[in-house]
Amino acid sequence: MPSKPTTIFACLNCGAQSPKWSGRCLECGAWGTLKEELREKGGAEKVSVPAPELIDFKEVSEEKLSRFLTGIDEVDRVLGGGLVPGSLILLSGEPGIGKSTIVAQIAESLGTKELPVLYVSGEESAGQIKGRLQRLGTDLGKIRFLNETSAEKIAAAAEKLLPRLVIVDSIQTVYSFLVEAEAGGLNQIRATAARFLELAKQKNVAVILIGHVTKDGQLAGPKALEHLVDTVIYLETETLHDYRILRATKNLFGSVNEVGIFEMTGAGFKEIKNPSAIFLDEVGESLSGSVISSVMEGSRPFLVEVQALVTKTVFGYPQRKASGFDLNRLQVLSAVLTKRAKVNLSNQDIILNVVGGLKINDPALDLAVSAAIISSLLNQTVDRQTLVLGEVGLGGEIRNVSRLEQRLKEAEKLGFIKAIVPGAEIKMGALKIEKVKNLNDLLEKIKS
């Protein structure tokens, strides 16, 4: 009895086979080339495929990566030195945080009369976009606008104009004719992002896709969107002030450790040239539980203020709460202080806060957190002109931190007179260095 034929889909371009249809061939990336074929089970013919030519890295000449400077230093820092032609960038953030504002400022800096920027919006009209651009003082001759949601039409317009930059606001509103689904769905976002990736690579045009963030802080749409793009940057805020933090979580052309600091004004984003100042409390008097330290964000040191409030537990187990600092790390430091420094925290609630809303993962903050906890518990103040730096080990020992000299120079520049650091060999000018080997040494200095 003959076997029942099965349906497969074969690519007319490269011959690749797939058990189900999709708008784009997964092998060669061509669109609309998968055609239905009937094959007998077990009777598929073997296809002879020639072996591709292997590449020897020794024979490949090293290419220098070219970049466009956006004219906004903080944006260039996060992107790794500028915007790379042919790159696909995903910019996301909460609604109303300023995504459209910052891309408008980038468009103003990058666009020229000969090489304009193509601004695509499926959510706002031309009048709304023009009003925002005029409020920001943008030269409208540098920007071309397209009110369209079809990925194919957007790509066709970009291929005809060949702009320096394409901005799509937002990717959740764009759809592709090749996928039968609503805009914003899993398949649509994958198909449209792949189409814009093809546009960026084939035409060497930089593309910025704006993506929404849901209420729980996740990127709306599939996580696979982040794997399709070259760079993922987030615009976020952590305070009640008008400060915005731009950070990269993926960057194929630079570091992901850099952050950009901005202030939101009526005329758009204003760069913060000295970010250390905004993360230090302006109150001049010393308070118990308040300690100044330094963290590294990329290649730049930030001075931050750590505040701790230690109070006697009224009911139940002692509470540990942290804002801007890892809660598990706070638990570890509390245990080390109790065990190694004989500071009894078993019946004390600890509330920790990093002033300014920064989220810190730098282990150099350990010693400052420990000092803040001891200071609050003993109600002893630490001089606000004293910098505290160091990593705390489980044995209560104080370990050295990276780029210690660079952090101390930043503190000296801002007028600090003393620094409590690990026992490392370091020489500074006017900054007095006090070395501690363990938490007991720190406890004695705070008591005195």
Image: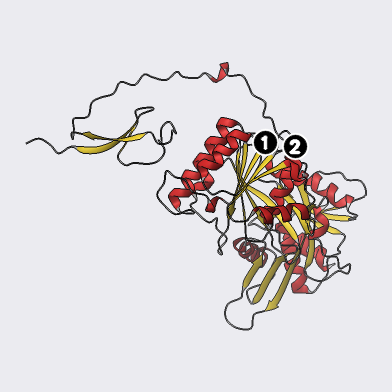
Whole-percent x, y for residue 309 in the image? 72, 73
Quarter of the image containing the C terminus? bottom right
Whole-percent x, y for residue 77 in the image? 73, 43
| Residue at 52% in and 44% down | 151
Residue flagged by tag 2: what amino acid is it? Thr
Closer to us: 387 or 120: 120
Q: What element carries label 2?
A: loop
From this view, report whether residue 265 is shown above or below residue 314.
above
Q: Which mark is residue 346?
A: none
Residue flagged by tag 1: what amino acid is it? Arg
From this view, report whether residue 346 is shown above or below residue 413.
below
| Residue at 66% in and 39% down | 165
Whole-percent x, y for residue 82 in the image? 71, 38
Q: In the rendered image, which quarter is residue 43 located in?
A: top left
- Contact flag, marks 1 and 2 (Cβ < 8 Å): yes
| Residue at 81% in and 55% down | 276
Which of the two discs, 1 and 2, labels the residue nearer the N terminus?
A: 2
Closer to us: 381 or 243: 243
Q: How far apart are marks 1 and 2 (CA)?
A: 9 Å
Give the crowd class for mark 1: few <14, some 14-19, many >=20 residues within 10 Å.
Answer: many
Q: Residue furthest left?
A: 1
194 left or right, relative to 423: left
Q: In the rendered image, which quarter is residue 365 located in?
A: bottom right
Q: Name the residue under label 1.
A: 164
60 left or right, relative to 407: left
Q: What element carries label 1?
A: loop
Q: In the rendered image, which quarter is residue 393 located in?
A: bottom right
From this view, report whether residue 328 is shown above or below residue 17.
below
Residue 143, can we see it?
yes
Q: Mark 2 points at which residue?
A: 112
378 left or right, relative to 229: right
